[in-house]
Image (cartoon, rainbow, N blue to C red):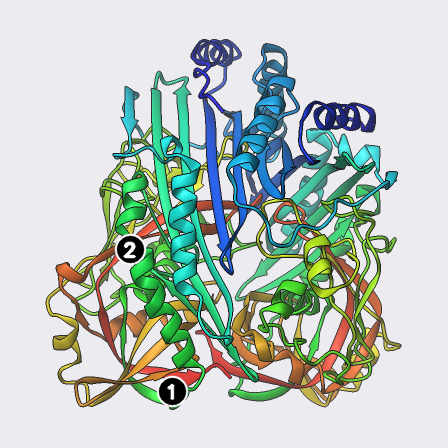
Amino acid sequence: MADRSVPRDLIESLIRDLKRRGVDYADVRWERLLHEHLLAEQGCVTTVSLSESAGIGIRVLLKGSWGFASTPHVTKARLARTVADAIDLARASAAVNKQPRPLAPVEPVKARHRSPCAVDPFDVPLSKKLDYLLWANQALLGPDAIRRASSHMDFFKRRKLFCSTDGAQIEQVIVESGAGLEVVAQSGGEVQTRSFPNSHHGALAQAGFEYVKRLDLVGGASTAREEALHLLRAKPPRAGQTTVILHPTQVVMQLHESCGHPAELDRVLGQELSYAGGSFLIPEALNRLQYGSRLVNIIADATVASGVGSFGFDDEGVPARRVELVRDGRFVGYLSSRESAARLKLPSSGGMMRADGWSVPPLIRMTNVNLEPGEGTLEELMRNVKRGYLLSTNKSWSIDDRRLNFQFTTEIGWEILEGRLGAIVKNPLYTGMTPQFWGRCTGVGRREDWQLWGVPNCAKGEPMQLMHVGHGAPYARFDHVSVAAAT
Amino acid sequence: MIGENKLLTTLAGLVKRTKGDGVSVCAHAKTRRVSRFAYEAIHQDLRQESMGVTVKVIHNRRIGIAGAETLEAASLNRCARAAATIARHAPQQRDLPALPQRFRTRDRADYAPATARLPATECVAALKALLRICQGAGAALAGSLVTGEDEFAVVNCAGVACYAASTVASAKLVTMYRRLSGYASGTHHDIAQLDLEALLKRSLAQSLSQVEPVTLPLGTYEVILEPEAVAELVSWLGYTAFGAKAVEERSSCLAGRLGDQLMDRRITIYDDGNDPEMLRMPFDFEGTPKQRVTLIDSGRAAGIVYDTLYGMRFGRPSTGHGMPPGETEGPLPLHLGMAPGAATMEELLRACPRGVLIPRFHYVNGLLNPREAVMTGLTREGAWLIEEGRLTRPVTTMRFTQSMLEAFSHVAGVGKTRGLIADPSQELGCAVVPALHLKKFAFTGRSEP
C-alpha cells in the first residue's frame, strides 16, 4: 500500500469555504493510519493483517455550538456534504446552547513534526518480522501445562494534516512499534497468566523496528513461562493491611486510572457523566487538594522522546507541553483543551486534545502521565519493610465513577519479608481510595529504574475512542494498603 | 446508505478479481449521529460515516488479511493485493477450516428509515423537551442520544453472499438533583419506539428525593439487579466464558464443566442473533448463519459458541459466531439473552426484606479470576436500599467482588419483563435480559459519599 500524497489543496479549499460561510472557528483534519498486526500462537503464525484507514473530519464552531462530521470519501462532492453536515449540527445545537464558547488562545503555526524512527517497520520484510515473532513464540512453549503461548507485534504509521480557520497548517507523521508475549498455564482448576514485558498488549513506543529488537522477547519468554508454571503452585497473599511496592508496570495502571483520568477537565465539567463518569478533582481542589505525599510528583509530558502520548501538536494545533498535575503531593494542574481551559480561565490549553482517527472529534486525552523518579533502588525501598508484597503486571482494573475507590489485581506478586523478596504469590488484589493511597506513598524509586510504557487501549468518549497514551514510572512504595486474594 | 446491490456487487467483484485458493471479504458500513449533553448544553454533536472492509486470501494453506476503509475500487484492489502478498509470505496454517459455503441472505427486518434520516433539528427539539422537563423539576440533565444505521455484508468464493441492514436508536439519561443522581437508558431499532420522556421520568424518579443517602456496612446483601446491571455481568461471561477459545485455554468457568449444574435452575442464558427482541444480525463475519446456542440451560452448563476454526478444533460445526478476520479473541456471543421469569418488579421488591436495588454498574471487570467468574465493579446512580419490600434510602457508591457462579446460584426471583441493552456508539452486540433478585452479593468496598 503506497503512501499517497496528502490532499493539501482540497483541505485548503475547505478552509476557505468554511471561512466564507461565516463560522466562528473550524478545523479540518485529514489522517491516514496504517496498522500491521502479527500474531503467533502455539508455535504458528495465526494472524498477519494490514489495515489502512483514511478520511477527513471537519469540526465547526458556530454560535457557541460545535458540529463535527467526517467521511472516508475524499472527493469534492462528499466533502461539501460533510461541511454542510457539520454546520447543520452546530446550527441545530445553537437552539439549545445559550452560552458563548470562547477558546483559549493559540498561535497558529505552519509546522511539520516527525516522531523518532530509525528503522521504518513498514520497510522491514515481513519474513524477518515473522521469523523473530516465531522465535519468541517457540521460546514460550514448554510442558503440557502451557495452554497458550502467544506473541505479537504491532506497527502503526499515522500521517495527518491539520488546518484551521485561524491559519494553522500542521503536518505530522508518527510511527509506533510494539511487541509482547503472553503465556497461560493450567493445572486442574488453576489457570495463571504471565506477560512480557507488560500486559495489555506488551510494550509500545514511538520508534521503529529497532525498539522491538531491543525488547529481547526471546530472553523474556523463559522467565514468563517459568513464572506462569510457578504460579500454579503458589499460595495467595494473606488478606490484611500491609506495605506494597508496585513494579513500574503496575504504577502505570495506578497513574492511568487514579491520576490521569480524574485530571481530564472535560470529565470534571460533567461532559462524560453518562458514560465514564465524573471526577473528584473538582475546580475548588486545584492548588488546594493534597493529592498524595510530598514524594509524589506527576507530570503530563507530551514532549518525552518515544512516548506514545507524544506529538508535535495536538488536534487543536496546540504545541506539545509538559504540564504539572501533582507537585510535592499537591494537585496543581489539569489535562485541558482550548475550550475547557477558557472555561476555567486558565491562561492556555494544556494541549491534550487528540482524536483516535479522522472519523471522530478530538477529546481531552492523557499524553504521557508520568510519576517523576525519586531515590533508591528496589532493594533500598524494601530494606525496612518487615512484611509486605511486591506486585507486578496489571491483570484487572476497576475504579468508581469519580475515580476514588479503586481495585487492581496483578499477574504476580512476591512476599517481602524482613526487607528481602520471598515466595511468589498468586492472584494478588489491592484496593484503596485515591488520595489516601497516594498520601501513603513512602518511597519513589530512582531514575535508573524509571520505565516508559505505552497503553494502546485507553477508552473514552461516545463514540468510544481508543487512544495510545504513555506512562513513565519507577518503583513506588505504599504503606497500609488493603491486600487480599482474588479467589 | 450504500444499499445491498452496490455493496454486494462491489464485494463480489473484488472476490472475483482476487486470486487465491480461497477469498472471503466482509464489510461493515456504519453511520452514527451522536449528541452528548450536560448541564443545559450540547457539548458534542457529530455525524460520522465509516466503512471497514477486510479481505482474507488463502494461498497454499497460508492466510493473508488486509483491511481498507473505503469501497473505492483502487483502494480495494490495493487491499486485496496486500492480502495476497501477505498470504504468499505467511507460514502455512496447521488448522485451516473450509470457507462457509452457499449461504445467501438479504435482511432489512430491523431497518427503520426515519431513524437513519433523523434530522439534526428533530433531535435537538427532543432534547429541548427533556431539558424543559428537567428544569421544571429543578434537576440537571446529562447524557447522550445516538442514532445510526449499519450494513453488514460477507461474500466469499464458495458461494456466500449475505447482506443485512439495520438501524439503531439509543439514549442514556443521567438526572441530578442535590446530592442524588438517577439513570435510565433505552435502545430500539426504531427511534419512534424510544420513549424519551418515559426514560427521563424513570431517571428523575431515582434522583428527585429529599432523603439523604446512606452508607451501608460492607458485607453480603440481597440485591435486585435491573436489566442493565444484569446485562453487564452476562456480557462479561460472554467474553470470558462462552467462547470456544476461552474453553480451549481452560480459563473459562465452563471448561471441563459442560453438563454440570453451575447456577440456579431459574437461570437460562442463550445467544440468538435472530431473536426479534435483539438488534438482529443473521450471519457472522465469516458468512455463517447464526444459530441459537443455549449456553446455560436451567443452571446447567450447556454449550459454547464456535467459528469455523474453533469448530474444526472441537469437531463441531460453526455456530455462526465468527468475528472479523484479524480479531484474536476467537468466537464470541454478541446477542445474549436470559430467559424471563414470572415476577413483576413490584413483586421482586416485595419479596426482598433487606437489600440493594441496582440499576446499572460502573466499571465491571471480569478478569480477576475468570475460571471462577470472579468480577468486581461498583454501583453508581440510582442505587437504593430496600427494606421490607420498599425503597427507603439512596445508597452511596459500593464495590462488589463476587463470583458470578456463586451469585447466580442463589436466585430469589427473575423478572418477567426483559430489557434490550446495547451501547451502539461503543460496540457491537446487545443483550436481552430480565431483572434478577439475588440472595447473596458481596460488597467489599465503598467510595466516599
Q: x%, y% of residue B257?
A: 70, 81
Q: x%, y% of residue B189?
A: 80, 45
Q: Position of A15 compared to A470: left or right?
A: right
Q: Earlier in the sequence, mark 2 or mark 1?
A: 2
Asked which quadrant contains residue A183, the reply is bottom left
Identify the amino acid type marked 1.
Pro
Tell me the quarter of the image containing the N terminus of chain B: top right
Chain ID at mark 1: A
- Closest to the observer: B91 or B247? B91
Instruction: Quickly name the residue at label 1.
Output: A237
Answer whether residue B208 is visible to the viewer in this image: no
Secondary structure beneath label 1: loop
Say how many tags the image has.
2
Q: Is residue A36 positioned above or below A162 on the image? A: below
Residues under numbered marks 2 and 1 in contact, where contact means CB atoms less than 8 Å apart: no
Q: Residue at x 43, y 37 (%)?
A: A126
Q: Is residue A235 positioned above or below B12 on the image? A: below
Q: Residue at x 77, y 70 (%)?
A: B303
Q: x%, y% of residue A385?
A: 19, 85
- Closest to the observer: A227 or A400? A227
Q: Residue at x 58, y 81 (%)?
A: B402
- Closest to the observer: B27 or B437? B27
Asked which quadrant contains residue A110, the reply is top left
> Residue B49, labelled with which disc?
none
Q: Position of B106 compared to A181: left or right?
A: right
Secondary structure beneath label 2: loop
Instruction: Quickly name the residue at label 2.
Output: A216
